[in-house]
Image (tube, grey):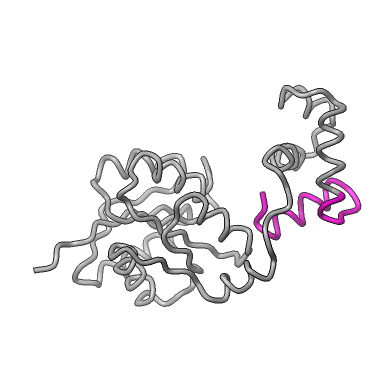
Amino acid sequence: MTSTIKVLLAEDQSMVREALAALLGLEDDIEVVAQVARGDEVLAAVGAHGVDVALLDIEMPGCTGIEAAARVHREFPRVKLVVLTTFGRPGYLRSAMEAGADAFLVKDAPAAQLAEAIRKVLAGERVIDPTLAAAALAEGANPLTEREREVLRAAADGSTNAELAQALHLSQGTVRNYLSTAIQKLAARNRAEAVRIARDKGWL
């Protein structure tokens, strides 16, 4: 007899989360043992429920699904990670794979496809949405360094250079240099456009 696959669902929209749980619950070999609405609740839930596979939405409060995936991968390397996205941003795929994800799928994929992906990752396979994979290859690597990403993320709320310098413990000149380089790399006209471009590509 096949043992039941224990799944954690992390999704901040309750209607979507409950629909996914109901659909996966129809599968004989899959049981949704835990549901969370925040990225920063994922690690504790994985540890508490002996989860085999974690299904993680990208956009969640607390921390993103990609950040949650990295934490789970560090603490519970045997747990398989399936990242779900509404946004087909190629940069997200690369980030998810770097965080240790075993699968990367769009959220509106058929339930049968999701269930099959869960079985495949448990068998040691990688499952990646082919359209997203092609887009990621076409897009190329993220041109921004970690520091440039950090400064751009912090600048997204409209903070001044002085405020950014204080928050990031950098000099104003250094902040200005990072922003200038990021804007140049992204061929943006200003920092707001640079933030938008980087977010659209999944590079933040």
Residue 131 location in percent, x, y? 57, 76
Residue 115 location in percent, x, y? 32, 71
Q: Which residues are magenta?
A: 184-204
> For this view, does 199 lie left or right of residue 122?
right
> For this view, does 52 lie left or right of residue 95?
left
Disc count in the image? 0
Would you identify the image quadrant in which residue 17 lies?
A: bottom left
Vertical comparison of 103 with 58: above or below: below
Picture residue at 51% right of the left edge, 69% below the top: 106
- Magenta includes 181? no
* Residue at far left of view: 1
* Residue at far right of view: 189
Residue 28 location in percent, x, y? 19, 71
Picture residue at 56% right of the left edge, 61% below the top: 93
Vertical comparison of 132 with 62: above or below: below
Residue 114 location in percent, x, y? 38, 71
Picture residue at 62% right of the left edge, 67% below the top: 136
Vertical comparison of 98 with 5: above or below: above
Q: Dividing the image into 4 quarters, which one contains the N terminus?
A: bottom left
Vertical comparison of 152 with 200: above or below: above
Would you identify the image quadrant in which residue 177 lies?
A: top right
Picture residue at 13% right of the left edge, 67% below the top: 2
